Every structure is written in C-alpha cells, then in structure tokens.
Amino acid sequence: MDKCEAVLKLLLEAVQGSVTAQPTENSNEIPVGVSNRHIHLSQADLNALFGEGYQLTKMKDLSQPGQYACKETVTICGPKGAIEKIRVLGPVRSKTQVEVLTGDCFKLGVPSQAKLSGDLTGTPGITIIGPRGSVQTSQGLIVAQRHIHMTPADAQRFGVHDGQTVCIQVEGPRGGMYSHVAIRANDASALECHIDTEEANAMGLGSSAKITIIK
C-alpha cells in the first residue's frame, strides 16, 4: 500500500508540474493575425463612394481594439487592371489607405512598397470605385510591412521597444524566419503579429499559429 501511495504521489507531482510549466514555456509565443487585402477610408472618400453622410455597417469586430470589418466593399483600379470586393475596415480614418498583396501590385500595374500603416509618403495613388461614385487618390496604396502589435507592458516583457525591427521564428514543416518585423507598442493594441496572406501561405501559417521573436 505504501508503495502504491508513493507512486501516486509521484504521478500527481508530475502532472501538477506539467500544468504549471505550460504558461512559462509558451510565454514567449505571440498569436498571428493573417490579413487579406482591405481598405481604410476617410469620411470624405466614404461620402464620395457611398453617398453624403454615409455610415459604415459593422460586420464583425477584429482582434485589435476598436477595429472592425464592414459589410461594404469597393473596387480598386490601376493602370493595368482592377480588383473587386476589397473589404472596408472601420472606423473611418483621417486619410484613405489601401493595403494589398505584392501579387496584386502586378495585376494593378502599380509599384509595390512595403510600408507601415499610416506612412503614406511617396506611395502610389489608386482609383477607388463605390456604388455611388469614384475617387482618385494621389497616394495611399501600400503592401503592409509585417509587424507586431503589443502594449508597452508586452514590450517590456519581450525586451523590445516601439519602432524596433526584429526577426520572428515560425515553426512547422514549412517554417523559417522573417526579418524586418516592426514593433508597434501602444496602449491601444492587443498582442498579435500581423502578416499578409502571401507571407502566411509561404510558411504554412493559419489563423491559430504562433510565432516567437528572435532579436
């Protein structure tokens, strides 16, 4: 009986140890958000495309606080082609920004420029067509630079800072490393690494994937 109790005690300690160790082992993992092409509109451009005073129709909330996908879609046109059903994301912004994939740039006939959201200087313009009108922008089309959203507390935990660029490690049969990943740390962020569908497909990443930072 004493021998059985000793064995049970060891098994219980092993199970408890594995449970408590789990968060520590995964504490350096960051969830991945995979982004497809989409558009952020200014209120002025929203009015031109959908009608004066138009309000976006929320379809579902996104992982970043206050951000949401909308029911509305538009068509974008470049010198060589067009892409339909570009999803509008809300809320409205001060400037219109179109985020596409590198392959889309060839179809549209526009330069491919990897930029962080909001950095629109020197980016190409695009024609946007909605149900009530069209807009020709002078700038604002980007391929989003891969980045990691986090709070300042997260940044301290990971030993990084806002504006820093790091490498990330992707596990799995098609895994590898991505460099030039920007840290975007502020109080309005939720912890998540954002890459686009081309980058995700290249390394076999799904929406439940996680990455680790390699400095």
Image: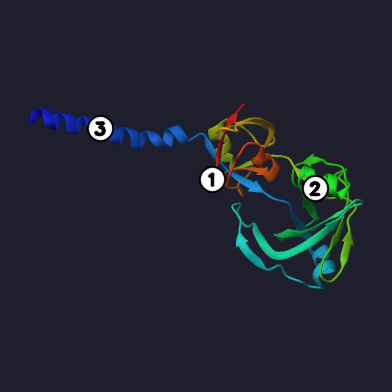
Which comes before the other along the chain, label 3 or label 1? Answer: 3
Q: Looking at the picture, how far across and down is residue 96, in whole percent?
A: 80, 56
Residue 13, numbered label: 3
Q: Looking at the picture, how far across and down is residue 10, in whole percent?
A: 21, 29
Q: Determine the residue located farthest toward the left in the rendered image.
A: 1
Residue linked to disc 1: 208
- Badge 1 amino acid: Ser
Which quadrant of the figure contains the C terminus? top right
- Which quadrant of the view contains residue 179? top right
Between the residue at mark 3 and the residue at mark 1, the CA separation in whole angstroms equals 31 Å
Say left or right for 151 vs 130: left
Secondary structure type for disc 3: helix
Residue 104, numbered label: 2
Whether residue 147 appears in this view of the structure is: no
Colour convention of the picture = rainbow
Whether residue 189 appears in this view of the structure is: yes
